[in-house]
Image (tube, rainbow, N blue to C red):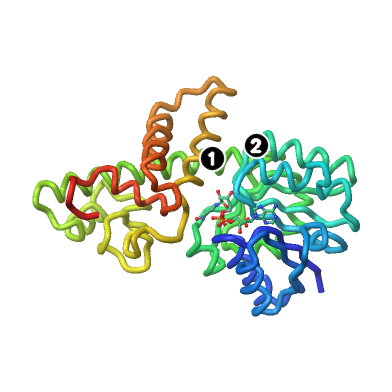
């Protein structure tokens, strides 16, 4: 049976690791947060006292960390994994990070004779829990073949976007579009409410009309319209405003480096930065709805 090391057991990594345990893999897991380790331990994974303990002597090493500096530090820092790791694992980093960081780490891995994939995901916490994530993979096809069965335990769709870093580029484009759609959906719903409409009635109408989009249909930002979405639990859990803001920052970096034009993405970045600066960085990104509400009214 393949041994897997898993580092980063947060909103996404926790349920992803649980699905691998359920699929029968032997997991060694590590996170800086003891409560995250506890959950995995209860499910049957072995917890470790350090990242290197989780990474040593496994067949596949998976990381799911917040951002580029975390990934850079873990793999390439002073005591980075790539300096000390033992064994020949396939490394799969599922974090959403800068394409250049993904390329730097995979180059360093390759110098050590290790294969690495960037494999950011789409589908949110619900997708991580249900094992229905979309993996957007950059790296060599033969490395993807090596890891495919494991990715299939956590996701339904696995796309090979291209060489190292390509998974991150595709993910950044997707999230920029998601942010733009979320903001547009929130402002349209608030416009309807401010003009006397019930947000559920308006959502039903737009879902069957040309304004239909993913946030409106599956992740409605207006409280009370849908059950089981962050908007109906005070925007707790889910995909944090600060993580969306980070992804939009990555999109702006890619815009500059490729001399592209992304005015809607730039506006989305400004609005999410403003929303975070108003104290909402730890809420789900659908809480952008709050930016449009009238003083004293819901949400
Ligand atoms: P999170 O903050 O909930 O989890 C990150 C985890 O990494 C935390 O538990 C933290 O303690 C741990 N960690 C950080 N540094 C560590 C280290 N050096 N060693 C061990 N553990 C460490 O974040 P998340 O929501 O799970 O997101 C993870 C990644 O997935 C991010 O890059 C995010 O952009 C991306 N993503 C998130 C979602 C979502 O809906 N939450 C969806 C798609 C992609």
x 72%, y 63%: residue: 30
Q: Image point 79% across, 42% down: which residue?
A: 76
Q: Secondary structure at mark 1?
A: helix
Depth order, front residue of 168/223: 223
Q: Which residue lies under the disc numbered 2?
A: 99
Corner quadrant of residue 258: top right
Q: Residue at x 45, y 52 (%)?
A: 282
Residue 198 shown left or right of residue 136 in the figure: left
Q: Which residue is mark 1?
A: 172
The image shows residue 256 at horizontal and vertical percentages of 55, 23
Residue positioned most to the top: 259
Quadrant of the rendered image holding ligand 1:
bottom right
Q: Is residue 153 visible from the viewing direction of this image?
A: no
Which corner quadrant of the image does residue 254 belong to? top right
User: Where is the C terminus found, in terms of image quarters?
Assistant: bottom left
Q: Is residue 97 above or below residue 30?
A: above
Which of the two discs, 2 and 1, labels the residue nearer the N terminus?
2
**Position of residue 154 measured from the top left corner of the image (x, y, whole percent):** 61, 65
| Label 1 Cα crowd, 10 Å radius (few <14 / some 14-19 / many 20+) | many
Residue 229 visible? The answer is yes
- Tell me where residue 106 appears, x and y as whole percent: 77, 42
Q: Residue at x 58, y 67 (%)?
A: 15
Residue 44 percent location from the top left of the image: 70, 79
């Amino acid at each position: 049976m393949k041994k897997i090391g898993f580092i980063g057991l947060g909103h996404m990594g926790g349920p992803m690791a649980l699905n691998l345990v359920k699929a029968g893999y032997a997991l060694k897991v590590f996170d800086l947060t003891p409560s995250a380790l506890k959950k995995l331990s209860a499910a049957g994974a072995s917890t470790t006292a350090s990242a290197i303990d989780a990474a040593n002597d496994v067949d596949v090493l998976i990381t799911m960390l917040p951002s580029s500096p975390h990934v850079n530090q873990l793999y390439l820092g002073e005591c980075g994994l790539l300096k000390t790791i033992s064994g020949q694992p396939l490394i799969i980093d599922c974090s959403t990070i800068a394409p250049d960081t993904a390329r730097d780490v995979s180059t360093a891995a390759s110098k050590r004779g290790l294969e690495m994939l960037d494999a950011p995901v789409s589908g949110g916490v619900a997708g991580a829990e249900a094992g229905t994530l979309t993996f957007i993979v950059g790296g060599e096809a033969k490395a993807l073949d090596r890891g495919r069965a494991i990715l299939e335990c956590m996701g339904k769709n696995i796309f090979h976007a291209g060489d190292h870093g390509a998974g991150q580029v595709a993910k950044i484009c997707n999230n920029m579009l998601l942010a733009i759609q979320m903001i547009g959906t929130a402002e349209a719903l608030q416009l309807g409410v401010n003009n006397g409409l019930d947000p559920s009635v308006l959502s039903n109408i737009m879902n069957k009309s040309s304004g239909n989009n993913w946030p409106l249909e599956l992740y409605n930002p207006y409280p009370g319209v849908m059950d089981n979405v962050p908007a109906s639990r005070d925007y707790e859990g889910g995909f944090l405003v600060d993580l969306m803001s980070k992804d939009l920052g990555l999109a702006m970096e890619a815009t500059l480096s490729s001399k592209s034009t992304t005015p809607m993405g730039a506006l989305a970045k400004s609005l999410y930065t403003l929303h975070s600066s108003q104290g909402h960085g730890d809420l789900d990104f659908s809480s952008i709805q709050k930016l449009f509400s009238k003083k004293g009214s819901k949400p």
